[in-house]
Image: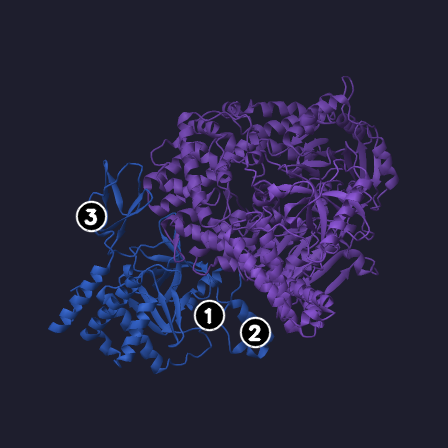
Amino acid sequence: MGSFKRKSQEFSNEGDIPPSKQLKQNELLGVDEPVTCLHDVSYPEGYVSSASTSGLPQQDSKPAKEFPFPLDPFQSEAIKCINNGESVMVSAHTSAGKTVVALYAIALSLKNNQRVVYTSPIKALSNQKYREFKEEFSDVGLMTGDVTIDPNASCLVMTTEIWRSMQYKGSEVTREVAWVIFDEVHYMRDRERGVVWEESIVMAPKNSNFVFLSATVPNAKEFADWVAKVHQQPCHIVYTDYRPTPLQHYIFPSGGDGLYLVVDDKGKFREDSFQKALNALVPANEGDKKRENSKWQKGLVVGKSGEDSDIFKMVKMIIQRQYDPVICFSFSKRECEFLAMQMAKMDLNNDDEKVNIETIFWSAMDMLSDDDKKLPQVSNMLPLLKRGIGVHHSGLLPILKEVIEILFQEGFIKCLFATETFSIGLNMPAKTVVFTNVRKFDGDKFRWLSSGEYIQMSGRAGRRGIDDRGICILMVDEKLEPSTAKFMLKGSADALNSAFHLSYNMLLNQIRSEDGHPENLLRNSFYQFQADRALPDYEKQAKILEEERNSIVIEEEDSLERYYNLLEQYKSLKRDVCGIVFSPKYCLPFLQPGRLVCVECTKVDVDIPIFSINEGVTWGVIVNFERVKGISEDDANKKPEDANYTVDVLTRCIVQKDEVGRKTIKIVRLKDAGEPAVVSLPLSQIDSLSSVRLVIPKDLLPSEVRENTLKKVSEVLNRFSKEGMPLLHPEDDMKVQSSSYKKASSRIEALESLFEEYEIAKSPLIKEKLKVLHKKKELTSKIKSIKRTLRTSTVLAFKYELKARKRALRRLGYIRDDVVLQKGKVASEISSADELTLTELMLNGTFRNIKVEDMVSLLSCFIWQEKLQDAQKPREELGLLFAQLQDTARQVAKVQLESKVQIDVENFVSSFRPDIMEAVYAWAKGSKFYEIMEMTPVFEGSLIRAIRRLEEVLQQLIQAAKSIGDIVLESKFEEAVTKIKRDIVFAASLYL
Amino acid sequence: MRGIRLSFSNTQKLRLEKALAQLESLSSKLNSNATVIVADKIPVDEDAALKGHGTLEMGNDVVASVCGVVERVNKLVYVRPLRARYKPEIGDIIVGRVIEVAPKRWRLEINFSQDAVLMLSSMNLPDGIQRRRTAVDELNMRSIFVENDVICAEVRGFQHDGSLHLQARSQKYGKLERGKLLKIPPYLVKRRKQHFHHLDQYGVDLIFGCNGLIWIGEHVDVKDAMVEDQVNKSDPQNTHSSSLPGSSEEPTDTPLERRQYICRIANAITVFSALGFMVNLDSVMETVTLSLSLNLGVHEMLEAEFHVLVAEQEAERRSTSTRRK
């Protein structure tokens, strides 16, 4: 990693602000100087910048586009970069006005007769942007999976996935595009889809420039460095955490009736009112506790009969104080609808507005068939909307969603209940944002909202030019620490981290193209870049340790080392022997109470090992032994020999209690100070057993008894001090007859005789010397392990997975010698479903002999991922097909596992869900939408999205069938497309 | 005798027959009974089978529509033709000759049943700038390629109207100059990861077009437009010397020695195709080395004796490689 030259400049209206102040990322709620931005440039390694970099003609001429309002500094900074023909990354809040930068880039490209591609993460957002750009510039086209409008236009709006596949196919657009605009580029951290951004950026045409629009990310610089490196061009960063309208943050404690200002518009956290708010929190009553399992309802439902729910009170208050319009965020679709239902008594609109709403609503619904107009979701929505209340979540029919967006923008909806999805995309601000919950369910557990999410959602508060400040209200229903709240409200934005992962489709597409190498893609990925970043740190660490090691000088190191090694060897042999002898099988019969036993002392310092042979052991007397109860039940079935045992030994100990009241017991030598105590020890801690047994008193509870017993032990020890304690002989007494024992014990004898030969052992300083040597050894091993991590990160991240995946592809017959075979060509066409399973299924002829409806229904299993609790089982013939799919999936997963791809076979198999098979079957049969909605308990919007994606897969399958040359199959897929592509499911977006 | 029109002496004939027989014995017997001719029935166990290229469904039977070998992948059945015209696949590297400069496109003869189309927008502009193609660009098309230019490109795919489109993704595609074009049966070129080869020791570029057109030419350094730009920027005096490819730079003559190498490689490939052997880099290089070690003149490589030698060498090579397996 070379160093990047950097230059930083500060731009501010009033100047004189120390740079560090703006650099602080977490200062984002209260930037003292509102209109500042941070500008930085990343240059690629070895880049020679010159004044005449841009040979572009528009340098001196008038700007490509002029805006009717004065630009914010960050906007004009970014536009300056674009004018110079250099890439720029703009990181700012949603409401700050990043679109201006995109608009300018488009205007510039159009002026220069160059193409420009605008990508966004979501189809709906693409539609909206298409409309926005179309009004501004006429030469605009749209390409999403659903619609294609004017693909020859100069400005193309598309989803990132489409852009990626265009690059793989080598569309001519890639040769004419001068600017690529990636909107919401922070989507790159999305676990599933983030990799698409990385692929697209790495493969982007070498001579084009980029505009990245992102929410505030603390590591924007890192991202820009990466782009600069991959594309060998400078990349500017314009960062601002400026909000056009400052925010005030309130807390609404559940059960209470008031708002408490916790963060004011200067960004100051008010501890005192935070405490007041928490005190006002009414503890959850009995009624709530019953509903504990349905957590989302908690605190939001009508508490007692006759009393208004919190959300009702809250909205009422907001309307009274004229804080409307308001967006209430909640974290599930059902909760969203439920809350809206609470508002039944409220009417926020006058009659004029109601008439308008009805007109807009029905003119939008006009394109639906009469049957679809009667859908419950449609008919239930209108009365709600007329009262000024709206719902917005992904479960809605797309058309309803769009109507609601339009109504909201027009100001007819005063109170909108929305999920997180509403927080990205088009500029749809409200005066107030309410968080109905501070906890969110993220797949497996409830967790606090992260500060990044909070920033994104609270970004909707405050309409620029209308409100002088935005209001955020947190509804809190349980105690939370001030620090948690502070972190949530004032924390920094989430970092942009790579979520790179490999897919077979990606590999096949890379291998397929002449100059594509999967290795190249990996090497250029943001993931690799971030991994490489950590390298200098490691190197430094290793260096420091090495210096430390070299500073340790020992005399006679060689002979000392030999002695050290010998000791180590001796110790390990000793351990082996102990392991054999003191396995329960041999020693259990000898663990009678009263037997003297030699045990290891508790080491004072773990780092310093004991170097002499007899050190660190002490004597005690066995009291009892017992079996350790394992956690698992099957322990009971184990043979007595295999179970774990502990021995209770009376010996001298130091008992200490720490603050928590936890006792720590240290075994010390008999002569040392300490109290006599009984400790349980694992068998491994026994050093040797003596043949001597003492008679011990039955009751050891009184301290004096124990003291006396220990005295007896010392006496015995003294008596035998000359000839040493008589020990139980492993072979003669304990009948240990294992060959490995014999081998080890003879080795020990040989070693013992060797000790005599070492002069050095007799040196008085031997212990200290050994300790120093030991330390040196430890340093060496630490250095080694750091160097190993260094090595593994310099080799490609994902290298092994890549190998494994290639192996899997070879075994399945998709590639041979890096040449993509027939099967591989099929799989490389499929990007919207599991490519391997679908390819195998297709080549096994499963689709060949089944009806089109069955086939569509089977394909739905590839699309549907939600797990439905009470989904009906598909009927037998469909079930049979599904079983076939599962078999195929299992085979595919097994081959992957054999190829050392990390995969959980059963998990993989169960990732295919049969839950909507029946509904899709009926849809393909020609049923009405309301009919299929009655068959499945899913949201309308989810089902529509699934069917749309199904069509996408079918289109890919048509291409795949073409490549194997089966005309019959191809026409079958085409027939399937015509069967499902109709009515409300494929109703055009209102934005088009 | 595989249609080789050469006068062999009797011993040569015997040696050649022996080598060929040896080769035949080495070829895998796996598919030997799977060869079909047109209208042959292809046995299909169930009707769940997928019928791929080269097959037709006639009533309940699946019949072959070309002569070749039946291949099966899972339930997919298709016929791999043994000797056929070139059939383009997406991503193939091909070499072709411009036959027409048409509006916004060039038409190329690529040894396929129809002419291929290379759109002006499907290749990088000489100045490397990313922009839409203008009328001026269209007028300047002849400064890029004219009729009879030899071009290397990649198959992009069939358009909706059934025409075959090509593209030139990077600088390494484009006009081929100062070299020799060779035409061999396309089935002798196997699709591989690499079709571009730079033979360092001879200073020669070798491109195996999947369509059976093979280019052997003097090595050209492919300059990435980006790098070139930067060189220009940092060194303003240099701007004039290294400018657009093929415009101001005077083509220096290819040295005789290199020309001989080009011919030698070309002849090696000719011999291979005459004998009906698959052409690949290793075997071609071996043949060139063989001719050099025998001190043969370039023209002598096309004589009967060398054909026999090559056949023997190939038989030897394959038998050792199978033995090693």
Secondary structure found at label 1? loop
Split into 4 quadrants, where in the image is the C terminus of chain B? bottom left
Q: Are marks 1 and 2 in contact (CB under 8 Å)?
A: no
Colour in which the image shows chain B = blue
Which amino acid is tagged 3? Val
Residue A736, image x and y in percent?
Answer: 54, 49
Q: Are marks 1 and 3 in contact (CB under 8 Å)?
A: no
Residue A205, image x and y in percent?
Answer: 53, 59
Residue A326 is tagged as none
Mark 1 vs 2, N-terminal side = 1
Colour in which the image shows chain A = purple
Q: Nearer the viewer, residue A91 or B114?
A: A91
Which amino acid is tagged 1? Val
Q: In the rendered image, which residue does mark 3 sit on?
A: B38
Q: Chain of mark 2?
A: B
Residue A68, image x and y in percent?
Answer: 71, 50
Task: State whether residue A591 is above or below residue B181.
Answer: above
Secondary structure found at label 3? loop
